[in-house]
């Protein structure tokens, strides 16, 4: 579908002509599903490396380097007990691994849309659904749950935030869509011969961004500077082998 929209083929054979590019360009749900749907096709090493590089301060739980995604679900409907919602709570993406769970709350644009109370509602709804899995266990031995706020980040609020609901703690990491796009473009440039299949996946993700109004032509390749200088200027260490640690409380900004 992305290719049909990108090449102005979508809707041409329908009686009522629809400007699919305009419809998709404004849609938070189509951006989320088209980007993350392709990300899950990548090997675990690349998936988590991309998120580490793109999201501010993103770190996996200590000892976890390349966890395998055992399942993922778009817009699950969870019990809304003890939240602001009446019937259900719907995070945008729910990702499960054997070591931790990840909730993704996405916004269409990169600035000033996230709601900290919505993060709490989603953590509470997660507890409503999965409390039995850790019932009777101390907090430190329960399966960690992370939350990724995708887009909608307020300027100056890039550091991780610690939230709590019903005795469960979660770290909220923050990422802007443009950061993710730039990181994917850099990774595609670094692929080696024999990795063309990965290049195809990354290219489709980049096309997904383009359909949603992002400028996808890399301007970095036109600059007369070696890549290592560019990576230093952008603060990237893509595929550098850096060891990541579970964040200490010093970089967390707990919500009051």
Image: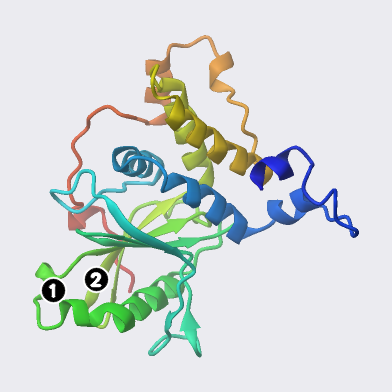
Q: Residue 177 versus residue 232: which sits nearer the camera?
A: 177
Instruction: Identify which residue, 22 or 223, lies in the foreground.
Output: 22
Q: Residue at x 31, y 48 (%)?
A: 58
The residue that appears at 79% across and 41% down in the rendered structure is 8
The image's colouring method is: rainbow
Alpha-carbon neighbours of circle 1 within 10 Å: few (<14), some, or many (≥20)? few
Residue at the spot 24% in from the left edge and 81% down from the top edge: 131
Label at residue 224: none
Q: Examine the rendered structure and indicate whether residue 144 appears above or below residue 117.
A: above
- Please state the horizontal and vertical placement of residue 169, each as a whole percent of the image: 24, 71
Compared across the picture, whether 27 is left or right of 197 comes to right
Rendering coords of residue 142 (x, y %): 15, 70
* Vertical position of residue 53 compared to residue 34: above or below: above
Q: Residue drawn at (16%, 77%), measured in percent from left and top?
A: 134
**SS of the residue under disc 1:** helix
The number of callouts visible is: 2
Measured as percent of width and height from the top left, residue 212 is found at: 66, 47
Report the residue that reaches farthest toward the right: 15
> Can you say which quadrant of the picture contains the C terminus?
bottom left
Camera-nearest residue between 171 and 209: 209
Mark 1, residue position = 139
Q: Earlier in the sequence, mark 2 or mark 1?
A: 1
Left/right of residue 142 with respect to residue 127 in the rendered view: left
Is mark 2 in CB contact (under 8 Å) with mark 1? yes
Left or right: where 130 falls relative to 202: left
Query: As rendered, which of 212 and 200 lies closer to the eye?
Result: 200
Rendered image: mark on residue 169? 2
């Amino acid at each position: 579908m992305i290719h049909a929209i990108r090449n102005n083929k979508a809707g041409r054979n329908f009686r009522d002509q629809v400007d699919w590019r305009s419809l998709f360009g404004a849609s938070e749900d189509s951006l989320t599903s088209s980007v993350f749907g392709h990300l899950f096709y990548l090997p675990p090493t690349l998936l988590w490396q991309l998120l580490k590089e793109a999201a501010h301060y993103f770190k996996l739980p200590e000892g976890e380097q390349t966890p395998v995604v055992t399942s993922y679900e778009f817009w699950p409907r969870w019990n809304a007990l003890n939240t602001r919602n009446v019937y259900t709570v719907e995070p945008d993406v729910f990702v499960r691994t054997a070591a931790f769970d990840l909730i993704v709350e996405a916004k269409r644009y990169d600035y000033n849309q996230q709601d900290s109370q919505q993060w709490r509602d989603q953590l509470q709804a997660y507890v409503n659904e999965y409390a039995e899995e850790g019932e009777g266990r101390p907090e430190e031995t329960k399966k960690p749950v992370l939350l990724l706020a995708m887009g909608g980040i307020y300027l100056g609020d890039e550091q991780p935030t610690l939230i709590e609901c019903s005795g469960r703690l979660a770290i909220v990491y923050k990422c802007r869509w443009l950061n993710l796009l730039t990181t994917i473009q850099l990774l595609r440039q670094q692929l080696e011969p024999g990795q063309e299949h990965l290049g195809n996946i990354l290219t489709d993700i980049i096309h997904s961004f383009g359909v949603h109004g992002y400028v996808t032509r890399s301007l970095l390749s036109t600059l007369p500077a070696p890549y290592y200088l560019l990576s230093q200027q952008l603060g990237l260490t893509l595929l550098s082998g850096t060891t990541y640690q579970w964040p200490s409380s010093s970089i967390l900004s707990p919500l009051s």
